[in-house]
Amino acid sequence: MKNCIAAVDMGTNSFHLLIVRVKKDGSFKIIDREREVIRLGSRKGRELNIISEGEIEKTIDTLNDFNKIAKFYGAELRAIATSAVREAKNKSEFITRVFDKTGIPIEAIEGKKEAELIYLGVKNALNVFKKKILCVDIGGGSTEFILGDKGQTVFAESVKIGAVRLSKKFFPDYHLTDEGIQACEKFIDTQLDKVSALSKKYSYDFAVGTSGTILAAAAIVHFRRFGKFKKSLNGFSFTKDEVLDLTDDILKCESPVDRLSIKGMEVKRADIIPAGMLILRKAFERFDLKRIKVSENALREGIIIETIKQMDEASLMHV
């Protein structure tokens, strides 16, 4: 199959494979996708700075599986790693071992680059080219804040607060305590001080939310509002009150099993969603958001778009 591209977003919480067919006009159609929960850096120490032996082995197995799927479509696979890999003390060993066992070179990108790729993905999902938007992407290891104006990145910042990172730090057994919740909120505040200039200095037309925590929250809110699930939540928006109500309900559930009683809760996210919702609630407060619109596109679509652009530039050089 010609003109296919495969991208892997090697996130802290999960790996996502996206395979697309590129059309003649440079747009693309998704033809396959896979997801595997990995939780890089979650098993050793209090920080996300050591990737364990088991996590390395799981990464190798997962990427080999993803590569088989990519080869079926005749697609070259591009793998981008984010927070957990770029911070790991054994980053070099991890990248070398994975390459030796899979033949896949891993690009460990910086937070600013991650934010810019997320914005590329969002621009492909929502009609934001004439708008100024604040994009919030809550991942496993970090949260990205992007201010985009008419398609251009004005501000891109990656903050070391993510659902896996904060769960490990403040709720190590995924059980909630009042002390843990208060300490987590204080930590988020401290980290968000690094982007406080964004709320004071800039205005924006609306906010966009991407990735795991926000998509999970949107799915639950949609069910609460309409009594049914929706396959695609792209463009769906929800309010501050809905975020506050959902966060309160989640924080009342002390254990992951308790959280599964919430209709629409994803089984594989029930353990880390309290930390993610604390980040989302704080983002609403910090930036005085009234509502947020969902983009189902994020980093992996951004990787695809950048790769298509690079291919176009390379072909022009050979003309």
Image: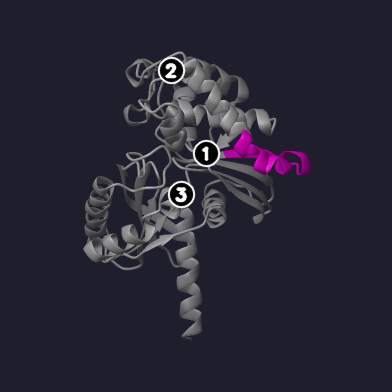
Q: Is residue 133 left or right of residue 174?
A: right
The type of residue carrying mark 3 is: Ser
Q: Which residue is mark 1?
A: 161
The answer to whether residue 193 is magenta is yes
Q: 38 or 262: which is nearer to us? A: 38
Q: Residue at x 24, y 46 (%)?
A: 54
x and y percentages locating residue 143 in the rendered image: 53, 42
Q: Which mark is residue 227?
A: 2
Query: Dot 2, how many residues are within 10 Å of its Cα: few (below 14), some (14-19), or many (20+)?
Result: few
Res. 266 image quadrant: top left
Q: Residue at x 51, y 27 (%)?
A: 277
The answer to whether residue 171 is magenta is no
Res. 253 image quadrant: top left
Is 117 above or below relative to 257? Answer: below
User: What is the C-alpha distance between the residues marked 3 and 2?
Assistant: 36 Å
What range of the chain is rendered magenta?
190-208
Secondary structure state at the residue bearing disc 1: loop
Question: Sequence order check: which comes first, mark 3 or mark 1?
Answer: 3
Residue 118 seen: yes
